Amino acid sequence: MSEDYKVYMCTICGLIYDEEQGLPEDNIPAGTRWEDVPEDWHCPKCDVDKSQFELMQPL
C-alpha cells in the first residue's frame, strides 16, 4: 500500500504544495513527493526555499 500524499504550506506567503497535485505550472508533475522536489526549488509566489515550508497535519 502506498503512503498517502502530504500537503505542505509556505510559512511566508501561505502557498500550498499538495504532492497529489504537484505544481505543473512550475514543472513539478502531479504525484511528486516533497522529498523529490529539487533542493534548489523556490516558492513561485515569494521566492523562499523549501526550508520555509511546513507539513500540514490532516484534520
Image (spheres, rainbow, N blue to C red):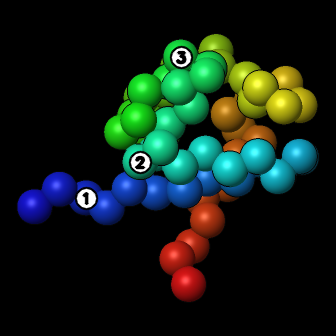
Left or right relative to 48: residue 51: left
Q: Residue at x 25, y 58 (%)?
A: 3
- Judge whether residue 5 can be spotted in this image: yes
Q: At which x and y percent is residue 31? A: 36, 39
Q: Which mark is residue 20?
A: 2
- Is 26 in front, or is 33? 26
Q: Amino acid at mark 2?
A: Glu
* Above or below, comparing residue 43 to residue 17 in the picture: above
Q: Residue at x 61, y 45 (%)?
A: 17
Q: Secondary structure at mark 2?
A: loop
* Above or below, comparing residue 44 to residue 31 in the picture: above
Q: Secondary structure at mark 1?
A: loop
The Cα atoms of the two marked residues, 3 and 2, are separated by 14 Å
Q: Amino acid at mark 1?
A: Glu
Of the residues under marks 1 and 3, which one precedes in the sequence? 1
Q: Quadrant of residue 23?
A: top right
- Quadrant of the drawing holding the N terminus: bottom left
Residues under numbered marks 1 and 2 in contact, where contact means CB atoms less than 8 Å apart: no
The Cα atoms of the two marked residues, 1 and 2, are separated by 11 Å
Q: Residue at x 46, y 57 (%)?
A: 6
Residue position for label 1: 3
Of the residues under marks 1 and 2, which one precedes in the sequence? 1
Q: At which x and y percent is residue 55? A: 60, 59
Q: Residues within 10 Å of mark 1 (few under 14, many from 20)?
A: few
Q: Secondary structure at mark 3?
A: loop
Residue position for label 3: 27
